[in-house]
Image: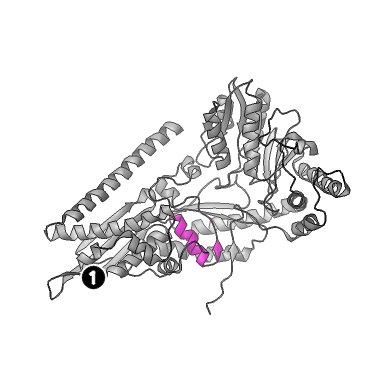
Amino acid sequence: MPRKIKRIYLDYAATTPVDPRVLKAMEPYFSEKFGNTMSLHSFGQEAKTALEESREIVADLMGAKPSEIIFTSSATESNNLALKGVAFANRNKGNHIIISSIEHACIMESAKWLERQGFEITRLKVDKYGLVDPDEVKKAIKKETILVSIMHANNEIGTIEPIEEIGKICKERGVYFHTDAAQSFGKIPINVNKMNIDLMTVSSHKMYGPKGAAALFVREGTKIEPILHGGGHEMGLRSSTVNVAAIVGFAEACKIAKKEMEKEAKRLTKLRDKLIKGVLEKIPGSYLNGHPTKRLPNNANFWFEGVEGESIVIQLDLLGIAASTGSACSSEKLEPSYVLLAIGLRPEQAHGSLRLSLGRWTTEKDIDYALEVLPKVIKRLRKISPIK
Amino acid sequence: MPIYSKTIIEHFKRPRNVGKIKNASGIGEAGNILCGDVMKLYLKIEKNKKGEEIIKDIKFETLGCIVAIANTSLLTTMVKGKTIKEALKIKKDDLIKELGQPLPPFKIHCSVLALDALKEAIYNYYQKEKIKIPEDLEKEHQRIVKTKEEIERRYKEFRELEREVLE
């Protein structure tokens, strides 16, 4: 029998396991309280009550009003609704939208699609840490600008953007401000009023809730068109039979985050910094991607000289560690991660990148194990390589 | 089903014939660091009693993804002890078949690269020994060189575009 290796999950930025407390809260909503929120009978009303209670809890974690929360199925859907919905509702005002060059693919692709529909897109560059300069936002806003969309924290390199300042600028200029907070919500504090946010994307499965639930915060009075037309669910902005069980789970995850976030962020920051320091010390030719301090408590991202990212990920997986690479081996195409290229990495450097993301069940022992294994993995792969 | 076959994982975990050969009869390189894959093959060629050229020893070095490493490792085991003529008959589909699973389309390139490195090593041997290069091999060599140039050209274009966007 082969020796059983321990399995360590260091890919919480991809998705998180459902917290057992969340699962417990969801359980009654499958076979017992299964009603359709639009039904008038008691089954329906039971579901409707659960939905509205969930709305209050999710709103509470970001300082919003419950009526400003639109539940969707995914962060991708929320981001699509924010960009396309605001673009089409405000066409008479202007056709210019500002985003950053390191947004998640669902923002990038929505923007590209809007470009084909006649909208003008400005993609702001970022500095070597992945930070957007608020002054650049100010300069880019013109009279046709209807929306600025800058993510709160980057999914690959974990950099936290100065969204409070950007929000202030947008407010002064009378431009809607959307932020994709899928990676940060429930991990670091967010207040939509303090940060002058008009629209915000949040996701359940990145914060120990189930997949299939997400939300878009839409500030009262914001002009926005739905993309899904039908029975008029979610204040007419998102028709579809409501996924009550998943939303109840999402709310429970928010409840837990509210209680535990502050302490957990401190604990993870300590583990993250131990990991970063350890890797940079133990592995020659290793570099941190992203900002040393303005980064998510749970994100570490490196690039290694003379190694290919997918090989690192597979080798780590064989040793029980689940990690991720920002760069797919697409041999013939020169297509490493656009985020890493945007922060100034050369393609050959971006190919050697690795993301380790921590979470609720990551222990110091896990970090120690990763620090024991990773240097050996890099050393071994470099030994096979023709480029020394 | 796991993403990669047992054979791929096995060759990745324990790659065969890793390293260099001193005073190699021929050295071949394929791929490009810019795309994330580089393969280098070293050949030791000797003649047998019949006067045929035999790949007496072969070693490789690869920078790349797991499929790239597995492909080169597997190829070395397939050609070791074979005549050059036999080695040149191996096609990418033979490699893929040996790997034991259909590769995702963008990984097929890894098998092509491993064979390219072998062809280049044999080409290098012929050149060194001033042996007349068969027409097929000459064609392949031209294609490999052209691909390399193409990648470098695209990289340059890409860098220029990047500068335009960023500056």
Residue sitting at 31 percent across and 64 percent down?
A: B60
Look at the numbered disc 1 and give the secondary structure of its residue: loop
Q: Looking at the picture, how far across and down is residue B135, in whole percent?
A: 16, 54
Give the quarter of the figure containing the C terminus of chain A. bottom left
Q: Which residue is mark 1?
A: B82
Query: Which of the 4 quarters of the picture holds residue A284?
Result: bottom left
Looking at this view, name the residue that lies furthest to the right: A42
**Is residue A68 in view?**
no
Q: Position of residue A5 (x, y in %)?
A: 56, 72
Residue at 45% over, 59% down: A311
Assess whether residue A318 is covered by the magenta stretch: yes
Q: Amino acid at mark 1?
A: Lys
Quarter residue A81 falls in:
top right
Please provide the residue range marked out in magenta: A306-327
Color style of the picture: one colour
Left or right: residue B159 versus residue A49 is: left
- Between residues B142 and B135, which one lies in front from this camera angle? B135
